Image (cartoon, helix red, strand yellow):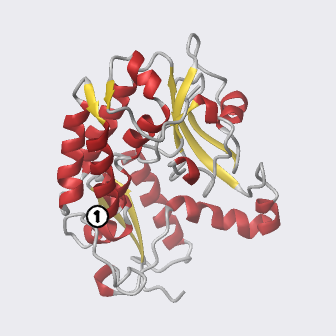
């Protein structure tokens, strides 16, 4: 690529990994693989928004981590106004393995018509939480049984987040959908970083929604009004025993259409998922939907 420098951006909550990376960089320099100073390790302040590539670059430059307007795109004008290629570390992880074993080996992995391997970070009501390397396209049901030791004792699957906080929420009836890119969008969800959160019949769905929205409200960089105000407003609406579904849907649409980056655009996903799939369960848990949510699907 003829790159002038390589930057690794690491959240400061991982001091152990920071030490490992410093040691690995020193080894690469000592072996003559890279020139001293070519790899720059930067500590981030722990902002979720810096997962967005242009906000990450702003942070690298010493500025507040706020997404940039596009164009220009970071591939044209990125770090210090230089053309910049941004990759997730998980992408880079696969490069030596693909080089050693070949593309055919990687493509031979996968299920249900999908190809490759993915790192699924599973948490919630399972016996074996953690990061599980599994075939792309595996279903949640298969992931639970084969990698996670099944549901925790006394818990029954109610719902799951297929792609972390912003990936939406799916009911147990959709635990047979292949988990991969482009398979979840028809259901209003996406896989994202494959951070799977398993929810049981003993969990409070409104508490889940409030927790996620409070997270987005706290992590919003505040640059654009739809995200800054929308997350706070939606959190307030979720605090009520009666949910105004029309207002929630309108607010979600504004956030999705007008937010600058993916944080604000995806923040309403957990709420719209609950309105779509879980009206009966919300009613059981003391939430009144008024008027009843339109285009509802059964979660049973």
Q: Nearer the viewer, residue 281 or 109?
A: 281
| Residue at the image position 23 percent from the left and 38 percent from the top | 235
Residue 52 horizontal/vertical position (percent):
37, 63
Residue 221 seen anywhere in this rendered image of the structure: no
Residue 285 placement, left or right of 33: left
Q: Nearer the viewer, residue 187 or 221?
A: 187
Residue 88 placement, left or right of 76: right
Residue 212 drawn above or below residue 219: above
Assess disc 1: are there few (<14), some (14-19) or many (≥20) residues with their C-alpha within 10 Å of its C-alpha.
some
The outermost residue toward the top is: 154
| Residue at the image position 49 percent from the left and 63 percent from the top | 88
Residue 49 drawn above or below residue 273: below
- Numbered disc total: 1
Which residue position is annotated with label 1?
A: 258
Residue 249 horizontal/vertical position (percent):
33, 46
Residue 129 drawn above or below residue 196: above
- The quarter in which the C terminus is drawn is top right
Label 1 secondary element: helix
Residue 8 horizontal/vertical position (percent):
41, 66
- The quarter in which the N terminus is drawn is bottom right
Residue 62 horizontal/vertical position (percent):
21, 69
| Residue at the image position 55 percent from the left and 58 percent from the top | 90
Residue 284 drawn above or below residue 4: above
Residue 177 seen anywhere in this rendered image of the structure: yes
Q: Nearer the viewer, residue 173 or 99?
A: 173
């Amino acid at each position: 690529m003829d790159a002038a420098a390589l930057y690794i951006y690491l959240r400061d909550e991982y001091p152990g990994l920071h030490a490992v990376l410093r040691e690995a960089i020193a080894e690469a320099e000592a072996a003559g693989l890279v020139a001293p100073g070519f790899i720059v390790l930067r500590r981030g302040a722990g902002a979720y928004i810096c997962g967005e590539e242009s906000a990450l670059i702003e942070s690298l430059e010493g500025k507040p981590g706020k997404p940039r307007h596009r164009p220009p795109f970071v591939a044209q004008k990125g770090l210090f106004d230089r053309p910049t290629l941004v990759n997730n570390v998980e992408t880079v992880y696969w490069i030596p393995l693909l080089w050693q074993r070949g593309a055919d080996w990687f493509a031979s992995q996968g299920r249900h018509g999908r190809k490759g391997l993915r790192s699924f970070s599973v948490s919630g009501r399972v016996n074996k939480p953690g990061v599980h390397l599994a075939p792309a396209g595996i279903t949640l049901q298969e992931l639970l049984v084969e990698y996670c030791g099944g549901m925790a004792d006394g818990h029954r699957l109610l719902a799951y987040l297929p792609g972390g906080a912003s990936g939406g929420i799916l009911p147990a009836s959709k635990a047979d959908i292949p988990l991969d890119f482009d398979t979840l969008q028809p259901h209003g969800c996406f896989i994202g970083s494959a951070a799977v959160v398993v929810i049981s019949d003993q969990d409070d769905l409104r508490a889940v929604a409030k927790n996620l929205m409070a997270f987005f409200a706290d992590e919003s960089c505040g640059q654009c009004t739809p995200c800054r105000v929308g997350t706070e407003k939606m959190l307030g609406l979720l605090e009520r025993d009666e949910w105004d579904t029309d207002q929630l849907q309108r607010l979600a649409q504004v956030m999705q259409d007008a937010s600058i980056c993916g944080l604000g655009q995806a923040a309403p996903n957990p709420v719209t998922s609950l309105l779509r799939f879980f009206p009966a369960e919300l009613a059981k848990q003391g939430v009144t939907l008024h008027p009843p949510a339109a285009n509802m699907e059964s979660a049973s």
